[in-house]
Amino acid sequence: MIWAKEETLTRQEMSDLQFNRLKETLNRIYEKVPAYREKMNQAGVACEDIKDLDDLAKLPFTMKQDLRDNYPFGLFTAPKKDLVRIHASSGTTGKPTVVGYTKNDMDLWTECVSRIACMGGASSDDVAQISFGYGMFTGALGLHYGLENIGASVVPASSGNTQKQIMYMEDFEATLLVATPSYALHIGEIAKEMGKKLNIKIGLFGGEGMTEPMREEMYKLFGREMKVTQNYGMSELIGPGVSGECLELCGMHINEDHFIPEIINPDTGEVLAAGEKGELVVTCITKEALPLIRYRTGDITRLFYEPCKCGRTTVRMENLSGRSDDMLIIRGVNVFPSQIEEVLLKIPQIGAHYEILVDRKNHMDTMEISVELADESLLDSYAKLGELEKKIKFDLRTVLGLDAMIKLVGPRSLKRFEGKARRVTDLRK
Ligand SMILES: [Zn+2]
């Protein structure tokens, strides 16, 4: 089901709508946000210089650092008394980034998530268990409001206490699961161990990327008929609801009437042509409290403008091959943990969990990957273990162009995560 008519506009209708909304937003920001006004003045660009959508490229970027520099409310265009919700994302260094919503922003957020839920096959018939951690993280409450809005019965289970989660799923006959892909796999494994047959037909996954082999693991655990989609967002932009996969599984449809996407060369900042791969930059054109202009997401993807078989005409972004924040540089080679995951999950003798340990020894970067065996019995055969280790090393070298040390460990011996998985430890820092 397609939730909103804006998902099926012609390209011209969409561009017209985007341009009008951009103008209105930009004027408001120029008037109300001194920090951005100063940036525009420094770049020598005025609101009147923006005469069509291509002129967006003349405007300065907004970076995560701008949010920190203007902590907590300096980039807001609405007065604090108009806010009805405030979230913050925990920064690993320094101050968190703070985001806020007016009443209208909440309606807009709910609308965007409703569309994404429908894209993933959700309906008012579903009992939706939300196993994202509630709190300052926008994921749980975003999905919560969107799913309630389409009429699903929402179970706000939050994350953790996995056995109780499984009891709720069984007793309430949950049909839909919201979680990070890694936590969903963990729930599936525990359910299997407990001998429970869950009836989850739809998985709306987010909070971290999901590789194709990981999707395959979902089918193995929850059944082939499950609809497994992922969606994308970030709290700086709105939270979840920026884009989501439809059931055609050919990238994530962006809610373009609210967010204008661009792809840039991350080194030079220049805008790349449609279809080229680069960093995703997003401009919010309908938000009242915090409409960021040309926000650099750090995520590497590309955009597809061809209409989709599902009937939606909105642009699709390719599933993320890795967040630039996650990228490791090992002996001068760029490595995304998702690349390692792709290699590992294609090898049937090993499970879906792994850990990457990066260190520096004698001025040389080293990478050790701990991998779980799928089956205990392999541990009894040194010959088979040796063979498997060799295969993993070979496959990794083919994809990464790097040698890694491999440590094979028994099934279920690595740490499990109830939210975003933290699989990389970098001891060089
Ligand atoms: Zn589609």
Image: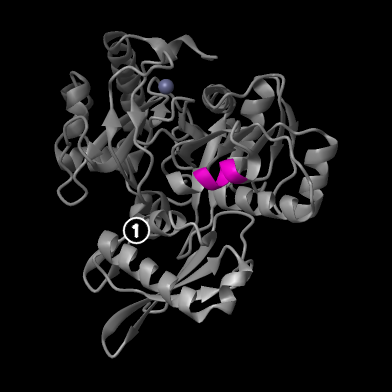
Dividing the picture into quadrants, the one containing residue 51 is: top left
Q: Is residue 192 left or right of residue 229?
A: right
Disc 1 designates what residue? 336
Residue under the image location 67 percent in, 54 percent down = 189
Work out whether 70 lies above or below 283: below
Q: In front: 156, or 411? A: 411
Residue under the image location 66 percent in, 33 percent down = 144
Q: Position of residue 89 (x, y in %)?
A: 53, 52
Q: In front: 114, or 210? A: 210
Which residue appears farthest toward the right when viewing the image?
171
Query: Disc 1 marks which amino acid?
Result: Phe
219 magenta-colored: yes
Work out whether 325 lies above or below 276: below
Question: Which quadrant: the N terminus?
Answer: top right
Magenta residues?
216-220
- Residue 33 visible in the picture: yes
Which residue appears farthest toward the bottom when viewing the image?
362
Q: Is residue 45 left or right of residue 234?
A: left
- Residue 138 visible in the picture: no
Q: Position of residue 403 (x, y in %)?
A: 29, 73
**Label 1 crowd (10 A; few <14 / some 14-19 / many >=20):** some
Dividing the picture into quadrants, the one containing residue 106 is: top right
Dividing the picture into quadrants, the one containing residue 186 is: bottom right
Question: Which quadrant: the C terminus?
Answer: bottom left
Q: In front: 186, or 85? A: 186
Q: Position of residue 54 (x, y in %)?
A: 18, 25
Work out whether 150 lies above or below 283: above
Dividing the image into four quarters, tell me where ligand 1 lies: top left
Give the main secondary structure of the magenta stretch: helix
Residue under the image location 30 percent in, 39 percent down = 281
217 magenta-colored: yes
Task: Say which element carries label 1.
Answer: loop
